[in-house]
Amino acid sequence: MNKKMCVTLILLLLVSFTACTRKHTRTASSPSQEKDAAQEACEYAAGAYKHLQKGEFDMVIQDASEAIRLAPPEACASVAYYVRAYAFHKKGNYDQAIGDATEAIRLVPDGNKVLVDAYRVRALSYLVKKDYERAIEDATTEIQLYPDDEAAWGAYCLRSMACEEKEEYDKALEDISKAIAVKPDDAGAYNTRAWLYAHFLKKDFDRAVEDANRAIELNPNEAAYYDTRGWAYLGIGDYNNATEDFSKALQLDPDLTESKEGLEKIREAQAAAPKEKDK
């Protein structure tokens, strides 16, 4: 998967989750009353969510599994399945993530934003598994559910990634441009579009430089953005600016292979230049 695609495809976590846990909180007037299964399930789900925030994915799976065991379908089961799907995805267990996300989608009430989060996890897992058609299908559903908010931004980014992998570059460009329209301060989306212009779409290096400039303006500390602009300058034949950008990228990330390759191409081009003149 192209590392230059949207740098921060963040899964949206969960306005509806808070409402779910509050709904089943024990009241102060009955402190000795035995917890019912739904309340206990939501407390386990709340614990899973806290572990998720800390990146403790094994504990997420443990607590979410207990919530699922205890919860009646109308309680916190959909949230628990979603949170566990997220943890499975982060651990690289993509088939399990898809299974749990599918169950969350089945159980979640209409209008609950857990639904779009579940579609996101499933789409990302399909993407990693190179099942691009299903990734596109789920991203499209996300967009249809929430066409104008940040959920749509992530879905457009994801769908752009899938289209690039399918070599449908015009569609990839269209979607990443829509992502920028929804969230115009996202540096990663500008970098993605710059990369598409520089490498796939008629080698439009001037537009690539323009978008990379905007990405760097928004986030001047990301090595990949200088690397993208370096390749655009290299395409134009501006070796001085390309060298400067590749060097800056390597200053920020000494292991960035693409920038090392870019500097090597410049050296090769400059070494070949005198030979061309002698012909």
Image (cartoon, grey):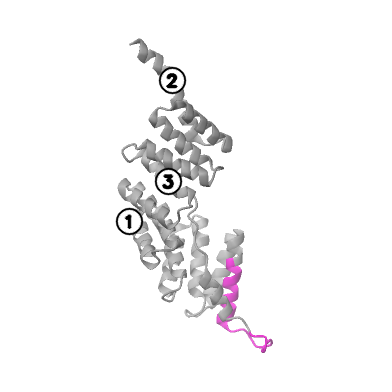
Residue at position x 52%, y 36% in the image: 256
Q: Which amino acid does the dot numbered 2 rest on?
A: Gln
Horizontal and vertical percent position of residue 214 = 47, 44
In depth, the one of 251 and 123 nearer the eye is 251
Helix, strand or loop status at disc 3? helix
Disc 2/disc 1 C-alpha distance (Å): 43 Å
Is mark 3 in CB contact (under 8 Å) with mark 1? no
In depth, the one of 23 and 195 nearer the eye is 195
User: Magenta part of the protein: which range?
Assistant: 27-49
Disc 3/disc 1 C-alpha distance (Å): 20 Å
Is 31 a magenta residue? yes
Q: Is residue 192 left or right of residue 48?
A: left
| In this view, the mark in front (3 or 1) | 3
Would you place residue 125 above or below residue 116 in this image? above
Residue wearing tag 1? 133
Horizontal and vertical percent position of residue 28 = 67, 86
Q: Which amino acid does the dot numbered 3 rest on?
A: Thr
Instruction: Name which quarter of the figure residue 66 lies in.
Output: bottom right
